[in-house]
Image (spheres, rainbow, N blue to C red):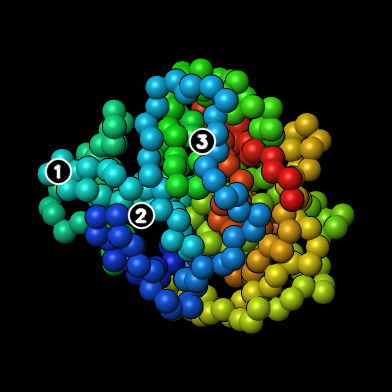
Amino acid sequence: MPTLSLYQKIGVVVLCLGVGDCFPNPTQNISLNDPKSQILNQSPSPTNKSSKNFSFPRTLPPHTKVQVLDTGMSLLLLGFQSEEGEKVSFLWDTGSDISFYEGSDPSQTKEFQIGEKKLRLRKGEGILPKGIQGLLGQDAFQGSCVFWDEGLLYWFSSDSPFCDHPDAYVGTQLKYLSTKQKGEHFFVQFEYPKSFVSFAHLDTGATLSILPKAGGEDSLGEKRVFRPGGTILTLEHWKAKETLTLRCKSGFREEYQNVEFLTGISLENFHLSGDKDKEEVWVIGLGVLRTRPLFWDFSRKRIGIIHQEN
């Protein structure tokens, strides 16, 4: 079996998965299972989080609705059913190329279904923390678009009118981010600190962002990061004083206050291809992404957020 490529982490997040129940392990470690990965085993304070689910101005076309459990460290997609009828939850990780499931059965592939959607996933290699039953990465969403708002993920086929004209269903506050693509992975244009503009990998599987340091941030201590081969890195954890800005294609600027992020990761810690572009290093993680409803069209290569006043 080919090695599973996790572009962005899986952390030591031990979860007890019952029927709708999930209890994060209180450990404070971060784990990098890929040279470019990170996930925190703590619940960062949500920034600008909305108090209620998004209200659509018109009826949605046919779709699959998936419950999303935000553990504070990661997102779990609930309600999948295996061929044997077992209820299964998956970690949602746009930082991973490949989806897979973990299991002790001898089969190398298995089909899972939710609503009308069916996914055939291959068996993993035991790299997920105990209690996490599988992972859905980029490949699971090819040929579709999604709209994620807090506890719900709305999943549409790419030929749906929702994917074609989402603003007709969510309103004019939908702003498309300025992005670029490398392989199957998306990078969004950001500004932090002030006047420093670059691109960051967009990753629903990373708890915190990785950003350059402006100076004057509030220190939140240090975190140990475990890398393949037993190497341990110590990273600095900060709360931004300046505003993090995501740039939109229209010129609109979406601003985020009090963002928590990590520093202390350098190019020497990574095995990057090509010219070791520094834009490969920065990450926009869950701490930022959970604060706005998110639209992601995997077929048309578009990512949008619903603008919210700070």
**Residue 306: x and y, percent?**
64, 38
Up the image or down, 70 lies above or below 270; here it is: above
Front position in the image: 63 or 191: 63
Residue matched to label 2: 3
Front position in the image: 147 or 93: 147
Up the image or down, 93 lies above or below 182; here it is: below
**Residue 223: x and y, percent?**
56, 78
Callout 1 amino acid: Gly
Q: Residue at x 17, y 48 (%)?
A: 86
Q: Relative to residue 222, is residue 217 drawn left or right?
A: right
**Closer to the observer: label 1 or label 2?**
1
Label 3 secondary element: strand
Distance Cα–Cα, label 1 vs label 2: 28 Å
Residue matched to label 3: 147
Callout 3 amino acid: Phe
User: Dots 3 and 1: beta carbons under 8 Å?
Assistant: no
**Residue 227: x and y, percent?**
48, 72
Q: Relative to residue 27, is residue 214 drawn left or right?
A: right
Label 1 secondary element: loop
